[in-house]
Image (cartoon, grey):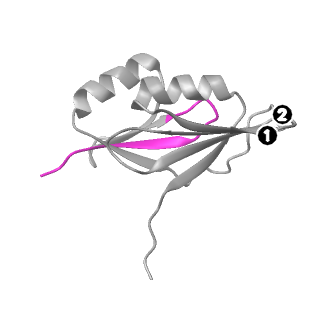
Amino acid sequence: MKFKMIHENYNVSDLQASLDFYEKALGLTEKRRKTAEDGSFIIVYVGNDNADFELELTWLKEHPQKYDIGEEEFHLAFRTDDYDAAHKMHEEMGCICFENPSMGIYFIKDPDGYWLEIVPERD
């Protein structure tokens, strides 16, 4: 029996702000969308051509406020082929929330407070 990771879900309070952030910060674009017939939710899967894995962004009509994501002890990691350029762009966006220079990594925070780790390619 084999398993393959296919997506991770983040609930978001402002779907358009999240879509804009993920496209600008990480180059993730909409792959597909599901909208409830009654308008109670919208699910958008974002990704890129570098991996099959997708991020599922779920907006719930009855939950417009930000989500309580606890103590931020979980995160999704992204490897980049140009760490310095990524860091500069994220610095300009003002979304870097934690840096660990000794490990050579940093984290950015999305509009709902989810942490995303940025890791350079390593030899």
The residue positioned 68% from the left and 51% from the top of the image is 70
Residue farthest to the bottom, as pictured: 1
Residue 35 locus on image (x, y percent):
74, 37
The residue at which mark 2 appears reads as 39
Quadrant of the rendered structure where residue 84 is? top left
Residue 77 shows in this picture = yes
Q: What stretch is highlighted in magenta?
A: 109-123
Q: Quadrant of the N terminus?
A: bottom left
- Mark 2 lies on a secondary structure that is loop
What is the crowding at mark 1: few (fewer than 14 residues within 10 Å), some, or many (at least 20)? few
Badge number at residue 36: 1
- SS type, badge 1: loop
Report if residue 117 lies within the magenta region. yes
Q: Badges 2 and 1: C-beta atoms under 8 Å apart?
A: yes
At horizontal 73% and vertical 44% (from top left) the residue drawn is: 68
Q: Is residue 58 left or right of residue 74?
A: right
Q: Position of 50 compared to 74: left or right?
A: left
